[in-house]
Amino acid sequence: MYENYFGLTERPFSIAPDPQYLYMSKRHKEAMAHLSYGLTQGGCFIVLTGEVGTGKTTLCRNLLTELPGNVDVALLLNANINEHELLQSICDELKIEYAKDATQKNLLDSINQHLLKTFAENRHTVLIIDEAQILSRDVLEQIRLLTNLETTKSKLLQIILIGQPELNDVLTRNDLRQLAQRVTARYHLGPLHATEIEDYVNFRLAVAGCKQPLFSRQALSKMHSLTAGIPRKINVLADHALLATYADTAQVVDAKTVKTAAGDVFIEANDRVDKGWLLGVDKKWLLAGAVLLMLNFAFWWAFGHSGDHTENLQVSTSVQTGENTSVEAAASERRDLRESQNQNNLVAENDNGAQTENIGKMIVSEVPLDETPEIPAALADEFIPAVPQAELASTESSQASSKSQAIASESSDTTVVAQTTSEQESDFTLMLEASADQTSRIAAFRKLTSLWSQTLPEQILQPACEELLKLGLRCLGFDNWAQWLRYNRPAVLVVEHEQQLHRVIVRSLQGDVARVLVGESALDVPVAELRARWNGVGVLFWQPPKAGTPLLQMGDSGAAVVATRERLNRALLSTNLPLLASANSTEFDLDMAQKVFALQTRFEIINDSKIGNETWLLLSELETGDQLPILRPRS
């Protein structure tokens, strides 16, 4: 209706999954990299999740347009099927003939024969299932069994599961752990950032032939706040806003028009129950509901309300008889009880949050070393140099945002151990008491520096981390045990004993035992006891390359990428992983992203296809070998 008015060749904000309108945001590029990697590396399962309307299906359609000509695809859009229907649908998509009365075994045999035949012809087959979160347990098990179709060296069928975040919850079930273990690539597609919405809207307008922006900046800002960055909601809202602007014969969509359009297309919480709904309800059901409501109220009055009445009566009687109890005291006691219950509920919620902290979280972004937060406060007066923040290393921003959950999780794991160690003196506590003069910040710092065959000067005139820069070392703070294990370097941990803080060096970990250094003394300490006494503050040293450690990701280019490609190739060679197709390229291309992902996955660090903190540490470790002090050998 409004296309000619705005000079458009077609409606730019259709909700159909047209790959031509796919805006490749940063997240969409990362998702494509993971999907492409999973397909090219011959993995079994690839999982793509995302909230409703984030563009999963459109991304899948775009993937289909980029697949090589020797790839056959079976695309299932209806996941509400049983095991027999699944096999029939695969046969239909791959044009495999079968009898109407074919059993599941007959269908499976036909599929296997077809896959063997196409594999001999150098063709590959991919099964893509959309809305996979509604697949039943039996169907998922049948899908897992399909991955058993293989030769001695290759899988005959690769499977992509696309679904809402609930799919991750399904795959964490214990009875589906065999399937979950076969997932070789996964990604969670999030909404658009506020800074991306302008490019998104203008991109779709440009594809539809528009030569100038049609939305004011205020309108775009309002649109993001109303849609939370969900592309489908943006499309619906933008379409109606353009229609309203056309009706007003205006030239540009303003914020007021966007807000008005949102009232027309989005159902607010208070509007979800329309009064007109009652008109369609049979009067006898309304009467039955009213009777049930009255019965519930009577039951509450007889049993629930009587308790409150009795309690008030007891308080009143107590006051009249002169006992040392007042209405205010009783009320205070009840408030204390409620607060105690609230605290218990809070602890329970924290425990649940700690247990499910990583569910559905497929890729965690690393932070460049130039954007680091400060070293933890407990180390600040000795460990933080008075230099720009660009000179300090960082912890991942996603882990910093969940710091309280991580500490709560570790605390819950070690509470019992802490109680046990407080009842009796252990060798570790005796060591701390005997070496209290050697557990200061600077003493621990000197000891850790010596592990790197370096020596701090006797008189430190500048903050210690700045002195380390002169020795070619950097500080890297952390507050999470799992994060430290991925960094894999000896570290200073702040531990507590008798309400005193001590700094100890953890030189190495071997199984459940940690090698702890204090001054010239060394002791093997149970990891459980060490974690029980650790207060969540730690710092390690590492040796960055002279060229620097910027955050690199797909789309970047320049000299830093060239130097990094050379280092990456050496690391891939040392681990027997496939090398980069072009070692001299200046681009951080899809091939490089795939190889980074493979290396990250191989060593179980954050696998986001970017080169950030953890990947720089890993590359340094693989290059240096035995000359580098590490926490434990990587598997």
Image (cartoon, rainbow, N blue to C red):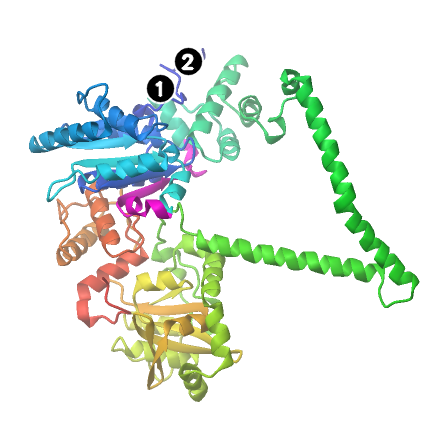
Q: Amino acid at mark 1?
A: Ala
Left or right: where 52 falls relative to 580: right
Callout 1 crowding tier (Cα within 10 Å): few <14, some 14–19, many ≥20 = some
- Circle nearer the N terminus (1, 2): 2
Q: Which mark is residue 471?
A: none
* Mark 1 and mark 2 residues within 8 Å of each other at the beta carbon: yes
- Residue closer to the observer: 274 or 568: 274
Q: Which residue is mark 1?
A: 208
**Quick one: SS at disc 1?**
loop
Q: Residue furthest bottom?
A: 434
Residue at point 23% right, 54% down? Answer: 602
Residue 31, x across and y down, in percent: 31, 39
At a point 91% along the width and 66% down the height, the residue shown is 322
Q: Is residue 193 magenta?
A: yes
Residue 380 in view, yes or no? no
The local secondary structure at tag 2 comes to: helix
Image coordinates of residue 581 in percent, x first then y, are: 13, 44
State the residue position of label 2: 3
